Image (cartoon, helix red, strand yellow):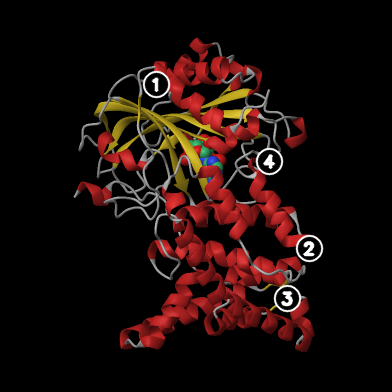
Amino acid sequence: QPLSSREIREKFLEYFEKMDHLKIGASSIVPQNDPTLLFINSGMAPLKNYFLGKETPPSPRLANYQPCIRTKDIDDVGDRHHLTIFEMLGSWSIGDYYKDKACKLAYDLLVDELDFDPKRLYFTVYGGNEDLGIKPDTESIEAWKKCGVPEDHIVVLGDDNFWGPAGDHGPCGPCTEVFYDTGTEYGPEYKPGGHFDDVSRYIEIWNAGVFMELNKKKDGTFEPLPLKSVDTGSGLERLAMVMNGCDSVYETDLLAPLMQLSKELLGKNTDVQTERMISDHMRASIMILGEGIMPGNEGQGYIPRRLIRKCVAACISRGVKPVFKKHIQKTIEMLGDYYPQLKSAREAIIYNMEQEINEFVPIVENGLKKIEEELSTNPKSKELFPGHVAFELVTTHGLPLEVIKAELASKNIEFAEIEYNECYEAHRKASRVISRKGGVAADQERIELEFIEVDDTEFTGYDSLET
Ligand code: ATP
Ligand code: MG
Ligand code: MG
Ligand code: MG
């Protein structure tokens, strides 16, 4: 009996409430008073001050659902399980219970409440780091064993299982994660001592405990934290995917309706990767616009601009008119109960989306025409598309690099990336000189160059918060 994403979300929260956790509301994806983040990228991010002891939580045990934006995963969109926007179900113990109970809570929820087959679950733990003088996390191993997990389903891994301060000091600690075995058709079986391939067959479903127990000092050494806390996060789309035996998150009820719309939109030139890209990018853009953020060249507005423009370009290069009104309606219909701001922002979302599309359509039409011209006048460019031509398309014609790359890839044409990067570097050096002179042109160039730089909403550490 398949569970809907609604039911999974509710079951997760009900379970933790039953276990004395206080259910708190989701925060906006726009960080409040946090200059280190462009967008909220984990359930824990809006709660950071509780862990630092700067604010007192309403309860030492919390649970919630939280939409997260991870633009650093943008290039993984299209694989089975990475989205630029997803919902994280989270639970926390702030100076309350620790590893034993955290693991037991996670195990019981998965196996008893959500009916996971324990044979398909794998548990990764931190193997320690001698160089840093950090011991292996044997307590988590023991905690899983107490739940009944057999030894060959416990996988000891390296630094991926240490949650560190991205800056050079701050709270940190080992983490333990739950993976789901999606079956032999997706890759080789893990055998103890062998390679644990977590990209295809084994899908990470729950960071079941970041155990914050150490403080990394500025001199690089570690000391124990006075307050030990647990931070967990599980992707709702991934739970829905593996629980319902879907090949990817896109077949779940959270994305399937958008996939259908994307397919209809793309018509006869459709392909699954583009459908996935549009479905994800639209959902993310709509959520961001729903927060009152407008597409633009700077800060937060740059993200929906980049996402929307990729979708527009994909349509135009297929000769399809970019119209995403149905995506907007559907997204609001699906998520509006949980994120009511979406409903009240409906008209603004439609309007700002249209503005962005109208602004970009002529740019991309012209840019793609220029690519065609280059291909027909310079036969060699069909083998290797010259980097300097691409660079000119970016800087003079405003065509985003990723649009150029996608267009060439769809035609199976290689792209001279190294040459492109050389042009980019040379230009950057030169424009530093221009910038010093100031002026509108310099500003415009800077904006266009920024547009092609990959953005990142990663949490960059506690540094700037501590001062
Ligand atoms: P991965 O290794 O798959 O990229 P992660 O280790 O970066 O995931 P965490 O930071 O541990 O993820 O986040 C907690 C949980 O959030 C993950 O276990 C997963 O269920 C979910 N999650 C993380 N990134 C994504 C994403 N891009 N799309 C959908 N769900 C995600
Ligand atoms: Mg990741
Ligand atoms: Mg991971
Ligand atoms: Mg993880």
Query: Tag 1: Cα neighbours inside 10 Å, few (<14), some, or many (≥20)?
Result: some
| Along the line of sight, the residue nearer the viewer: 14 or 234 | 14
Q: Is 51 drawn above or below residue 279 in the view shown?
A: above
Confirm whether residue 195 shows in the render: no
Give the spatial CA distance, label 2 vs label 1: 48 Å
- What residue type is disc 1 on? Glu
**Residue beneath disc 1:** 17
Instruction: Indicate which disc residue 384 carries.
Output: 3
Q: Secondary structure at mark 2?
A: helix
Q: In the rendering, at what x and y percent does residue 66 appear?
A: 43, 40
Q: Earlier in the sequence, mark 2 or mark 3?
A: 2
**Residue beneath disc 4:** 251
Q: Secondary structure at mark 3?
A: strand
Number of residue marks: 4
The quarter holding residue 219 reads top left
Q: Secondary structure at mark 1?
A: helix
Give the spatial CA distance, label 3 vs label 4: 37 Å
Q: In the rendering, at what x and y percent does residue 356 appear?
A: 51, 70
Give the spatial CA distance, label 4 vs label 2: 20 Å
Query: Tag 2: Cα neighbours inside 10 Å, few (<14), some, or many (≥20)?
Result: few
**Residue beneath disc 2:** 269
Tell whether label 4 touches label 3 (CB within 8 Å).
Answer: no
The quarter holding residue 399 reads bottom right
- What residue type is disc 2 on? Asn
